[in-house]
Amino acid sequence: MRAFNLEDVRKKQFNKYISEDRRLRIKTYTFNALFSSITEYLTVLGILLVLGLGGYFAIIKGTMTGGAVVAFYTFLGFLYNPIVRLSSTTSIIESGLSSITRIYKVLDTVPTPPEKENPLVPVDRAKGEINFKDVTFFYDGAEKPAVQNINLTIKAGSTLALVGTSGGGKSTIISLITRFYDPTSGELFLDEIDLKEYELQWLRMNISLVLQEGFLFWGTIRENIRYGRLSATDAEVEKAAELAFAKEFIDELPNGFDTPLGERGISLSGGQKQRIAIARAILKNAPILILDEATSALDNESEVKIQKAMEQLSTDRTTIVIAHRLSTIRKADKIIVMKDGQIIECGSHNELIEKAGEYYRLH
Ligand code: ADP
Ligand code: MG
């Protein structure tokens, strides 16, 4: 959610449910408090009344037998029990309230890392130049750094491909750019200003993420694409889907763009999910694009289409791609090969092939 700048939207939706729920609970709660005190009063009042009137009729007037009074008193006891039990439902409600408190605690979790007090919110969108200056990062409690002494410049509008074996530090580089984490040491700049200076929301508005398998939310296909830009019209949503080569399969679905996704919805193939994620990114139109190419094999047709869609998307944007496909890597302006958290090779495809080093061996 955080990555897609949707915390607020989803929080609002959730808050609506929560406040409705809370309203009802408070109502029940108040009713119960009132009810149990009334029951208490009635119990005492009832006993006094039965004993008083019973005594009056049995002893003074003689119209009732003592047995009848006792029987009446006993039956009254039977009646009290269920009434008292009703008011004890409060405890069940209390346990409900405590779980709500727990849910709130999760929702209130401070995003890590925290935002600066008076963060910078540039009027313009980012140009998209990214600079790593001697960046080292340790995950919490890790003994060795996930990335180490990274020095790297990604020019605005250029494409950088990250390659290397698993555990090399590629995903960590991306997590630092999106500010899921801050460097343990060193500095990271966007347009020559430290990343920490910017407002997080502004930063994430300027970054589109297309992750492996695409990340889908609960909701319809239309809603899923619209999360790229909430103000987009239906026509814009459909146009984005078309550019992402997603419209063609969406139109085949019985409910088209209004088909629900998620647990209760239909399931899409990996390639279809990715195309929805691409459509969302097209709609968002952010100056920085981060792609995590799917490692799993897609069917050939999907593959070609996704490739085309991604190429369109990356034009004129700073693009950082964790690349698994040779075709993507070849087109990159710069390739870095990562191993054990370090950049071991850097250059264009031709340069690195000529070098006949690690990159050459990877192919
Ligand atoms: P890659 O994406 O190239 O496979 P990663 O950036 O995911 O590499 O991982 C780099 C190193 O950081 C690895 O040693 C990995 O085990 C470690 N690492 C990755 N994510 C976490 C995490 N959330 N907590 C602790 N260690 C992590
Ligand atoms: Mg990874």
Image (cartoon, rainbow, N blue to C red):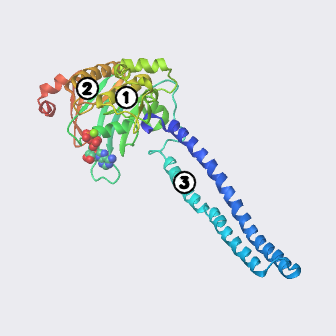
- Circle on res. 277: 1
Look at discs 2 and 3 and give the one toward the viewer: 3
Mark 2 sits near ligand 1, with its Cβ under 8 Å away: no
In the picture, measured across the screen, residue 60 lies left or right of residue 213, that is: right
Disc 1 versus disc 2: nearer the observer: 1
Query: Element at badge 1?
Result: helix
Depth order, front residue of 347/244: 244
> For disc 3, does the CB lie below 8 Å from ligand 1?
no
- Disc 1: CA contacts within 10 A as few (<14), some (14-19) or many (>=20): many
Task: Using the rendered image of the protein, determine whether residue 300 is visible from the camera's viewpoint.
Answer: yes
Residue holding disc 3: 101
Q: Quadrant of residue 131?
A: top left
Instruction: Decide which of tag 1 and tag 3 comes sooner along the chain.
Output: 3
Q: Amino acid at mark 3?
A: Thr
Residue 198 visible to the viewer: no
Location of residue 220 in the rendering, given as x and y in whole percent from the top left corner: 44, 30
The spot of residue 33 in percent (x, y) is 69, 61
Q: Give the amino acid type for the residue marked by disc 2 in the picture.
A: Lys
Q: Point out the image quarter for the C terminus.
A: top left
